[in-house]
Amino acid sequence: MQEVVENITLEKLKPFPNHPFKIREDEAMMETVESVKSFGVLQPVIVRKTKDGEYEILSGHRRKRASELAGRKTIPVIVRELSDDAAVIFMVDSNLQRENILPSERAAAYKMKLEAMKRQGTRTDLTSDQNGQKSVGKTSREMLAAENRDSATQIQRYIRLTELQPELMKMVDEKKIAFTPAVELSYLKPDEQRML
């Protein structure tokens, strides 16, 4: 089935729930705004329709923000029908390829995708075929690693960062705490982390 591009008003678009990737209004964003002013949005935003008739952004949060800053009222979109778990996986996959992802963003994204993959793993229609299991002997984390540049162990370490208190996670993002010590700090109880 061929996908259709349609124009939708910006106010009908809402961010993906718990979208882990921050939208920075930095120099790169200002360049995108200028591009949108000059040429429009060249790559459609990928969305899915919500029960209330609005649209949830799966890919294109930055393009939407650039369009707002450029003063546009509509944006080209492609509407896809995806389950909640499939939507999480698509949203994470379409954003993990970006450059300059903060450790907190990568950690939250890996955690979201791994949880969605595990939920899908309990469904036989997604994990098996006529010949048996599709992923015999592989954990969800190993399957996630096969799709990304990080090893299964490194993914586990990133996910561990989600246990950090927000102020410590901010310090990791700002490179005030290195990755390996941050992982070790994540094993402290929340009240112990606050004492640092």
Image (tube, rainbow, N blue to C red):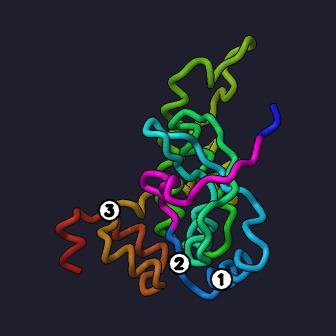
Which element type, helix, strand or loop, lies under badge 3? Answer: loop
Closer to the chain start, of discs 3 and 2, is 2
Q: Position of residue 169 (x, y in %)?
A: 38, 73
Name above or below for residue 68 compared with residue 146: below
Instruction: Report if residue 7 lies within the magenta region.
Output: yes
- Residue 8 vs residue 22: left or right? right
Looking at the rendered structure, the kind of residue marked 1 is: Ala
- What mark, if any, has residue 171 been given in the picture? none
Label 2–label 1 contact, CB within 8 A: yes
Identify the disc placed on residue 28: 1
- Mark 2 closeness class: few <14, some 14–19, many ≥20 residues within 10 Å: few
Residues under numbered marks 1 and 3 in contact, where contact means CB atoms less than 8 Å apart: no
Q: Quickly name the residue at label 2.
A: 24
**Boundaries of the magenta span:** 4-21
Q: How many marks?
A: 3
Q: Residue at x 56, y 77 (%)?
A: 69
Q: Nearer the viewer, mark 1 or mark 3?
A: 1
Structural distance between the alpha carbons of marks 1 and 3: 36 Å
Q: Is residue 52 above or below residue 44?
A: above
Quadrant containing the C terminus is: bottom left
Q: CA distance from mark 3 to mark 2?
A: 30 Å
Q: Residue at x 56, y 72 (%)?
A: 68
Which residue shows up at 49% across the image and 74% down it? Answer: 179
The residue nearer to you, when weighing 94 against 81, is 81
Q: Nearer the viewer, residue 191 or 67?
A: 67
* Near-viewer residue (135 or 1): 1
Q: Is residue 120 visible?
A: yes
Residue 166 vertical position relative to residue 143 in the rendered view, above or below: below
Indicate the amino acid at tag 3: Tyr
Query: With respect to residue 9, does 172 lie above or below?
Result: below
Residue annotated with mark 3 = 187
Measure how far apart labels 2 and 1 are at the Cα level. 9 Å
